[in-house]
Image (cartoon, coloured by chain):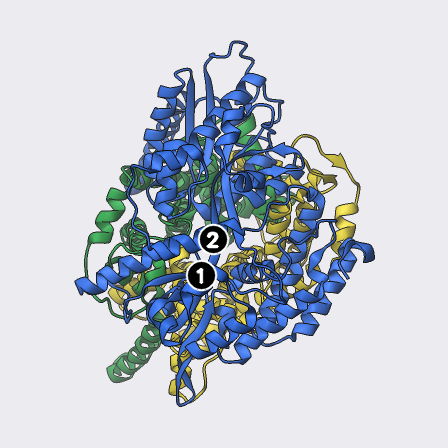
Chain colours: A green, B blue, C yellow
């Protein structure tokens, strides 16, 4: 009943197939995971300088000193994590809501200038950030005068073109008939969006949520530009403080990187049920 | 339908939460946010002791440096009760980009800690503040002459230096002695390239065609190759890209000489043939594990790092660098080329003063100078420089440092002092547009070709020709040394 | 330019224009303020010699200089080569992995998804350090040890122009699939079972189903990943900057790096803006072609 044949009754064939698949996936996963593995084992090393770091596949000794070092290095370590969580959550929620609304409008609603507007959005996405960064900085700092605030960290990321584009591409495949039926039954567009489009788009919204969160969480440069006190920095900005002129505290940096990757794991696993096969168009249709 | 309502409700709840968070952001702004850097420049205070805020963008100069920010702010305020010093922390690699963005936006901080080579770059944008008239005589006299010159451009003074660091080489004392090199003599008198070449040949240990120890390894991966060339050509009679009559120097025959020598050391087998992708971490690892006799570039603080690793080997708790041996780090000068004299490559970093879009008032200017001097002298400078194992360059710093103990190898200390005395002089006379052109030529032609030269894909002559052609294109036939 | 978002040939709900504007209103306001305004500023700056204390108008100078700059075109070629080698292959790998994950049990599915997603969450600094070790030029480097095992002598991966670009491409192939895999899986899960059922009644094989159902259904997703992938790849410079510094002999210099250097290192902001707009035009051209080939949505 799916892409793969069920091999009903031929369980041997099914097992062989799955075994082959798993072997391929594991091999590729090993290549992909190697850097992560290295990051984690290094984080259990002593808080020494990077220049004296030794590359070895297995840690010489395991110690939590670097984690301790990380939290003791600055009294703001925890606050950095908090700031990042706050900013990334706000950006995520607002993107999921507004980008999906806009994506729905661009894919399913007919209005004048729709294609022109969408093209404009895409073209703007093609301009490298290196040149838009200075005007944006002037806007936030010199015109709005909101540097070093959460607003400055959150506002520019509220809705991204990437997410609108993503939502549009996915929502385009929702059959128009369903939406028209709902309309005939007297739903207005907002109701259609909430009652039909959103439930059908759960998977893509979960994907959008996690990608947006991750992106915002990993953003370094913008928060670095607009914050000027340690208490307003995000974790990515804070982590960079482990690099000094000629030395880098390597293991604590890796410990920090490991800690900063954790929230995304939590998010991933809490959203993962949406990544599995859920409500589909057919179910609604039927 | 119930489930859908729940989704809806939670979205609204989150939206509410979002707006309350945004509000909370706004309120912190009011307390935590003194005037923006741009309006500090436009203060219209008349009296000299009116309240003022000075902003400073500072990287982690030493490992202890950023931890001292609260204390520094407090001490400054105690010294000048009407003034507030507000320090913005930034990481080394990224602070240039932050500063550049702020400069481009017309609102830099009042003070930033940068390398003196950045001065000509910000001069171009007219965003530096000349403090020649504002710095008092006592302040200026506190500094050693040579490093202070580095903070000048044309006739203007654009801040105070924090330290002058010599870029030298570092050797493994035991290996040097085994190879029969009189390192004490070299520390005192220097060496020529031919002597150096022989010495590093003797340092090579190989068995069955495989080299287990090289004579010399320098970090040249990516952008660090610039340092390599820069250090060598200073000792080939080219302390600056421009001669004293402002002709581009890297077209001289000596430049070709250095390029040939760079190749020769690799072809001799004294340096690894993979040199072009050895980075700073790698070569330090090679040094500690006995895979090379001499390494570069060498900074004073490396002695400290080596000592720390020695202690760990002794403790034998698995925390020392894997495969490392005990090393007595020995400062060595860079060899001289083509009979030229020794001119150590010096890096002067310091507190540079900036202006905003509006012309700063005389009062604000005076306050900024007070803050810059506070940071670049006395106790602050003394403790930072001690952390870094670098020499003190202010009288007040030397005095403050008397009570702070440091353990350094006497020979190394003397060697660094010898080199400091021979440091390449500052060149405030180079006009900013010439300086900018030279930097561009370096990035777009010299560094890429040098990487090709080191990896054996280009001959020294071909590189020399490429540099010469590009230089003539940029500076004209008459703008270059023949 | 309107062709870029090629009108989707299908029926659409009529009479909801007002709703349409209402739905995009917030997005548009945010866009206008934080994206369009800076872009327009950059456009104006591209005709100026920019200085914070007052710029001067220089007409098309910045563009003319750029068009004459051999290094600019060399870096464009490098970027195109890099993009052609990384984006399509990367998409193919992501697609294949997503297809392979699909038949597994739920627990295994989740595990593999998490595993492939992991590298995307790790900090770039941490990753670049490991890659430098992998490409270590001495015989002790990881790849060189592998080669040694097969009797090949050690290579100077990042340091020689023959292998530098390839090394960067390989790095892209082996990492950074997390996002595409997740997006592909989401799209795969959205394909209705009824299509497969219908196909099975006709006795369609796995490959047939893949070709006639999966690939067409995933077209919008592929288009999305391709366009955003190309945009990302054209703007990228971090990897080249961190790993090779653009060398040797500019073999890995990317346009992004040049723009960055012009904007900050040399303070030629006007020129950087002009180069960005030229770059954007090139990307737009490529995107247009992609929309032409893949833009028509499939009606089921």
The quadrant where residue B74 appears = top left
Residue at 33% x, 67% y is: B288
Does the rendering let one see residue A74? yes
What percent of the width, then of the height, locates residue B123? 64, 37
Is C239 displayed left or right of B75 in the figure?
right
Same-subunit check for callouts 1 and 2: yes
Q: Which quadrant does the N terminus of chain B fall into?
A: top left
Q: Nearer the viewer, residue B84 or A231?
A: B84
Mark 2 Cα shell of 10 Å, populated few (<14), some (14-19), many (≥20) = some
Residue B228 versus residue B362 in the image, above or below = below
What percent of the width, then of the height, locates residue A165? 52, 50
Q: Do the residues under discs 1 and 2 have CB atoms within 8 angstroms? A: yes
The quadrant where residue C68 appears = bottom right
Residue B51 versus residue B343 in the image, above or below = above
**Any mark on residue B418, and which?**
2
Residue A7 versus residue B55 in the image, above or below = below
Chain under callout 2: B
The quadrant where residue B32 appears = top left
Residue C120 versus residue B175 in the image, above or below = above
Secondary structure at numbered mark 1:
helix
Mark 1 Cα shell of 10 Å, populated few (<14), some (14-19), many (≥20) = many
What percent of the width, then of the height, locates residue A205? 40, 49
> What residue is pinned by disc 1?
B187
Q: Which quadrant does the C terminus of chain B fall into?
A: bottom right
Chain under callout 1: B
């Amino acid at each position: 009943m799916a892409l793969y044949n069920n091999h009903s009754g031929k369980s041997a064939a099914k097992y062989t197939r799955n075994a082959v698949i798993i072997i391929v996936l594991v091999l590729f996963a090993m290549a992909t995971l190697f850097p992560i593995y290295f990051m984690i084992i290094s984080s259990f090393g002593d808080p020494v300088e990077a220049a004296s770091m030794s590359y070895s596949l297995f840690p010489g000794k395991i110690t939590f000193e670097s984690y301790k070092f990380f939290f003791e290095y600055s009294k703001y370590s925890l606050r950095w994590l908090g700031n990042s969580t706050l900013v990334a959550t706000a950006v995520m929620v607002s993107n999921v809501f507004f980008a999906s609304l806009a994506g729905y409008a661009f894919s399913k609603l007919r209005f004048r200038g729709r294609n022109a507007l969408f093209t404009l959005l895409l073209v703007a996405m093609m301009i490298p950030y290196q040149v838009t960064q200075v005007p944006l900085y002037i806007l936030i700092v010199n015109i709005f005068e909101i540097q070093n605030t959460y607003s400055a960290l959150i506002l520019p990321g509220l809705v991204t073109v990437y997410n609108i584009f993503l939502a549009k591409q996915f929502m385009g495949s929702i059959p128009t008939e369903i939406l028209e039926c709902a309309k005939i039954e007297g739903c207005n567009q907002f109701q259609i969006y909430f009652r039909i489009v959103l439930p059908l788009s759960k998977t893509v919204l979960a994907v959008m949520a996690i990608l947006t969160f991750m992106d915002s969480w990993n953003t370094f440069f913008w928060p670095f530009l607009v914050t000027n006190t340690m208490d307003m920095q995000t974790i990515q900005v804070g982590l960079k403080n482990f690099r000094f002129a000629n030395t880098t505290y390597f293991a604590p940096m890796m410990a920090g990187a490991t800690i900063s990757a954790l929230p995304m794991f939590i998010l991933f696993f809490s959203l993962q049920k949406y990544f599995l096969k859920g409500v589909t168009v057919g179910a609604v249709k039927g | 339908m119930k489930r859908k309502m729940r989704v809806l409700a939670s979205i609204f709840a989150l939206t509410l939460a979002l707006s309350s968070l945004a509000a909370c952001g706004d309120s912190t702004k009011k307390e935590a946010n003194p005037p923006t850097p741009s309006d500090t420049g436009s203060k219209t205070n008349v009296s000299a002791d009116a309240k003022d805020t000075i902003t400073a963008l500072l990287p982690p100069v030493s490992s202890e440096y950023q931890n001292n920010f609260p204390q520094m702010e407090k001490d400054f305020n105690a010294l000048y009760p009407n003034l507030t010093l507000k320090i913005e922390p930034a990481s080394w690699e990224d602070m240039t980009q932050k500063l550049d963005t702020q400069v481009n936006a017309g609102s830099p901080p009042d003070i930033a800690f940068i390398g003196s080579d950045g001065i000509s770059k910000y001069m171009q944008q007219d965003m530096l503040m000349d403090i020649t008239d504002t710095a008092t005589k006592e302040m200026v006299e506190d500094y050693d002459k040579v490093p202070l010159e580095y903070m000048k451009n044309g006739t203007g003074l654009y801040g105070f230096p924090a330290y002058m660091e010599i870029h030298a080489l570092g050797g493994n004392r035991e290996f040097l002695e085994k190879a029969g090199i009189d390192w004490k003599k070299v520390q005192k008198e220097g060496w020529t390239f031919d002597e150096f070449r022989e010495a590093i040949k003797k340092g090579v240990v190989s068995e069955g065609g495989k080299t287990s120890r090289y004579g010399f390894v320098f970090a040249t991966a990516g952008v660090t190759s610039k340092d390599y060339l820069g250090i060598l050509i200073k000792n080939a009679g080219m302390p600056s890209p421009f001669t004293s009559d402002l002709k581009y120097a890297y077209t001289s025959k000596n430049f070709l000489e250095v390029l040939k020598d760079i190749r020769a050391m690799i072809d001799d087998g004294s340096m690894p043939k993979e040199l072009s992708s050895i980075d700073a971490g790698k070569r330090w690892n090679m040094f500690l594990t006995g895979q090379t006799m001499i390494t570069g570039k060498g900074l004073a603080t490396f002695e400290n790092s080596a000592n720390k690793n020695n202690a760990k080997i002794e403790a034998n708790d698995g925390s020392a660098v894997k495969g490392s041996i005990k090393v007595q780090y020995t400062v060595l000068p860079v060899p001289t080329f083509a009979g030229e004299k020794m001119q150590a490559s010096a890096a002067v970093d310091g507190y540079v003063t900036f202006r905003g879009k509006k012309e700063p008032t005389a009062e604000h200017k005076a306050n900024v100078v007070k803050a810059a001097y506070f940071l670049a002298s006395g106790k602050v400078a003394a403790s930072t420089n001690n952390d870094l194992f670098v020499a003190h360059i202010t009288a007040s710093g030397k005095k403050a440092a008397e009570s702070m103990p440091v353990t350094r190898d006497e020979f190394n200390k003397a060697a660094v002092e010898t080199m400091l005395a021979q440091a390449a002089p500052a060149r405030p006379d180079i006009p900013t547009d010439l300086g900018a052109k030279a930097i561009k030529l370096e990035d777009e032609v010299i560094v890429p070709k040098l990487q090709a030269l080191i990896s054996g894909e280009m001959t020294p002559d071909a590189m020399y020709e490429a540099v010469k052609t590009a230089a003539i294109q940029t500076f004209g036939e008459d703008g270059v040394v023949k | 330019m309107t062709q870029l978002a090629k009108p989707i040939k299908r029926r659409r709900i009529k009479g909801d224009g007002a709703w349409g504007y209402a739905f995009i209103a917030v997005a548009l306001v945010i866009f206008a303020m934080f994206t369009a305004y800076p872009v327009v500023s950059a456009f104006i700056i591209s005709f100026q010699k920019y200085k914070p204390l007052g710029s001067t108008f220089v007409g098309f100078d910045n563009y003319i200089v750029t068009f004459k700059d051999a290094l600019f075109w060399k870096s464009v070629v490098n970027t195109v080569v890099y993009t052609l080698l990384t984006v399509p292959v990367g998409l193919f790998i992501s697609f294949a992995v997503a297809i392979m994950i699909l038949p597994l049990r739920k627990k295994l599915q989740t595990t593999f998804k998490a595993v492939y997603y992991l590298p995307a969450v790790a900090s770039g600094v941490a990753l670049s350090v490991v890659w430098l070790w992998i490409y270590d030029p001495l015989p002790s480097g990881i790849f060189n040890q592998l080669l040694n095992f097969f009797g090949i002598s050690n290579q100077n991966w990042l340091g020689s122009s023959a292998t530098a670009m390839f090394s960067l491409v390989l790095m892209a192939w082996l990492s950074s699939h997390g996002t595409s895999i997740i997006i592909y899986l989401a799209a795969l899960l959205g394909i209705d079972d009824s299509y497969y059922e219908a196909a099975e009644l006709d006795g369609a094989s796995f490959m047939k189903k893949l070709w006639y159902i999966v690939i067409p259904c995933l077209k919008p997703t592929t288009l999305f990943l391709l366009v955003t992938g190309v945009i990302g790849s054209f703007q990228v410079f971090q990897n080249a900057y961190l790993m090779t510094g653009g060398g040797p002999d500019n073999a890995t210099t990317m346009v992004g790096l040049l723009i960055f250097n012009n904007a900050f290192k040399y303070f030629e902001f006007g020129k950087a803006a002009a180069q960005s707009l030229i770059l954007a035009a090139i990307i737009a051209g490529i995107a247009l072609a992609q929309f032409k080939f893949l833009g028509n949505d499939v009606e089921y």
